[in-house]
Amino acid sequence: MSALVEVRDLVKHFPISQGVIFRRQVGAVHAVDGVSFDVNEGETLGLVGESGCGKSTTARLILRLLDPTSGEIRFEGEDIAQSRRAELKPLRRKMQMIFQDPYSSLDPRQTVGSVIAEPFTVHGLHTGEGERRRAVQALMEQVGLNPEHYNRYPHEFSGGQRQRIGVARAIALKPKLIIADEPVSALDVSIQAQIINLLRDLQRELGLTIVFIAHDLSVVRHMCDRVAVMYLGKLAELAPSDGVYGCRHHPYTDALMSAVPIPDPRVSRSRQILTGDVPSPTNPPTACRFHTRCPRMTEVCSIVEPPLVDYGEGHIAACHHPVNTNPEELARVTIAPESSATAGDLLPEREAPDLAASGAHVSSASSPT
Ligand SMILES: Nc1ncnc2c1ncn2[C@@H]1O[C@H](COP(=O)(O)OP(=O)(O)O)[C@@H](O)[C@H]1O
Ligand code: SF4
Ligand SMILES: [Mg+2]
């Protein structure tokens, strides 16, 4: 499978300045800090992590709505990390974004017809009035909206229908890549599944590649071929969906996973409750950024940044004391090329750490979920 997008050691630091007359930089928000991954042609890649871990920043960097601090971004093999605005214009047709809050991303004074037609206007397509109307109405039909509602305003639609308007606008130019940034987080649970099914159907029909961003694992479960888990600007784990939901290796993924409900009342499992807030990305914890909240943390975790290691079959994780593995598997792991430039070269320990000595920061409770 070929990669449509290749991200290599991508970094985005937002400077923090102080002073009224002489502004000087006093620090930086480490929003994305050395992240590497591919998005393969035709796949849906989930990007998951708590609020503030850098998901939206990663999305905006890939679409070049933001300039990276450093690192490479390749789209169809072409390095676009430093491309200028004019050079990006032809690429904009091929990459589109769907936003979390459909209402705030729609202009309330424009009719739905003109909202969906906007990409045509920007790129000079379907210039005749009748032709444009037909193209927009075909899109409305494709996303499950009534084409007769062409002249209505966004406030006349429900949340789910507004997100359909966002989807119609995103597919108008027949893009190759769609980045959906928490597209269902603001919707009722009953509506979420409808939008997820719509995206899945469109992906199949149009051969789209989708990056689907969510803050919890349950949403991406039925949608994604692979899932990448981020923590405080770093990639913690990336695996085919089966690997994340079945045999995840990173304690953070494990904690996120334990919050996913099992739809069977007879099944109970040990539930981990992540305590404490995500630390500030202005001054992130040393070495493994999860060490201030991790139940398996030992001294090495705060001294050496764990490299991303390759567990085979496309499964990579960055942890000195991984879960759900065994000494035989650990004897075979190697450092993955996706590992951050700042990480050490220490492979995971084959022995489980002494948890009693490590001082757990995650409480466990056995409860049916
Ligand atoms: N334009 C910006 N200026 C300064 N800090 C920003 C900016 N955009 C995002 N951040 C900070 O970067 C971090 C990552 O943000 P974001 O990528 O939006 O996270 P997520 O989408 O995972 O919630 C957060 O701490 C956020 O406050
Ligand atoms: S065990 Fe150590 S390296 Fe692994 S996630 Fe916990 S703190 Fe990080
Ligand atoms: Mg976000």
Image (spheres, rainbow, N blue to C red):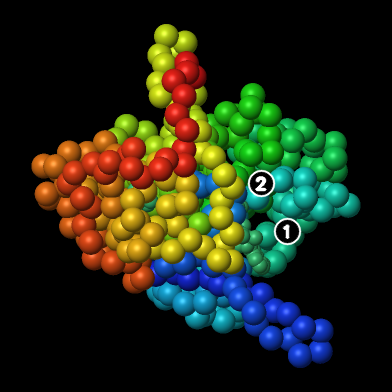
Residue at the spot 59% in from the left edge and 59% down from the top edge: 280
Dot 1: what SS?
helix
Give the x, y percent position of residue 166: 68, 47
Identity, as a three-letter code, of the amino acid under mark 1: Glu
State the image quarter where residue 142 is shown. top right
Give the x, y percent position of residue 43: 39, 47
Q: Which residue is mark 1?
A: 118
Q: Image check: 351 left or right of 66? A: left
| Vertical arrangement, residue 282 with respect to residue 251, above or below | below
Q: Does the rendering let one see residue 97?
A: yes
Q: Crowding at label 2, few (<14), some or many (≥20) Cα neighbours within 10 Å?
A: many
| Vertical arrangement, residue 329 with respect to residue 172, above or below | above
Q: Does the rendering let one see residue 58?
A: no
Dot 2: what SS?
loop
> What is the C-alpha distance between the residues marked 1 and 2?
19 Å
Identity, as a three-letter code, of the amino acid under mark 2: Gln
Residue at the spot 47% in from the left edge and 42% down from the top edge: 361
Residue at the spot 59% in from the left edge and 47% down from the top edge: 277
Q: Image check: 75 left or right of 2? A: right
Q: Is mark 2 within 8 Å of ligand 3?
A: yes
Residue at the spot 77% in from the left edge and 56% down from the top edge: 129
Where residue 100 is drawn, which disc sits there?
Answer: 2
